[in-house]
Image: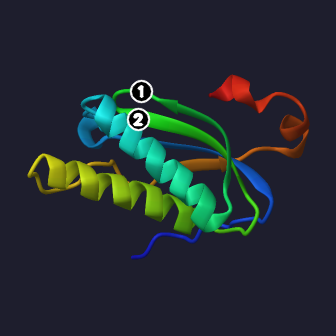
Amino acid sequence: MSRPLRIEYAEAFYHVTTRGNEKKNIYVNERDRRRFLFYLETAVQRYGAVIHVHCLTNNHYNLLLDTPLADLSGIMRYINGSHATYFNNRRQRIGHLLHGRKQCSPMLMHMQRNCPYAFI
């Protein structure tokens, strides 16, 4: 059975988080972190995403982003897929790097006007 579709909104704020499979690290060193930040920057250029806040920890990340074109799935597929491919190739490993589906929640309008950064 397929997963239910997520409704995506244009010009919406989302809090997105993705964790490493089995809570394992998704960045081993500073080079991995810089490469991940490169993928974030490329997503901004390619999809028009606006990343307001990012927080990288060893085994997961949080983003607060704005999706002008209602393409959150495409943005996250690019970021997660690119990083997983890089990480696996660099370490000559196979298998999942990231656990399941991204966790995301649209930020409520009243929170957009206040300070949503407290969540991240």
Label 2 neighbour load within 10 Å: few <14, some 14-19, many 20+: some
Q: Could you tell me the amino acid type at mark 2?
A: His
**Amino acid of disc 1:** Thr
Q: Image point 41% across, 44% down: which residue?
A: 36
The answer to whether 5 appears left or right of 87 in the picture is right
Residue 113: percent from the left, percent from the top?
A: 91, 36
Q: Is residue 115 left or right of residue 52?
A: right
Question: What element does badge 2 sit on?
Answer: strand
Q: Residues within 10 Å of mark 1 (few under 14, many from 20)?
A: few
Vertical placement of 14 versus 11: above or below?
above
Rounded to the nearest whole Å, what is the CA distance between mark 1 and mark 2? 5 Å
Q: Nearer the viewer, residue 31 or 105?
A: 31
Q: Residue furthest left?
A: 92
> Residue at the spot x=76%, y=63% of the render?
68
Are the residues tagged 1 and 2 within 8 Å (C-beta)? yes
Drawn side of residue 49 relative to residue 30, left or right:
right
What residue does disc 2 label?
A: 60
Q: Residue at x 59, y 49 (%)?
A: 104
Is 20 positioned to the left or the right of 63 in the image?
left
Quadrant in which the C terminus appears: top right
The secondary structure type at the circle numbered 1 is loop
Residue picked out by circle 1 = 57
* In the foreground, 10 or 30: 30
Most extreme residue toward the top is 118
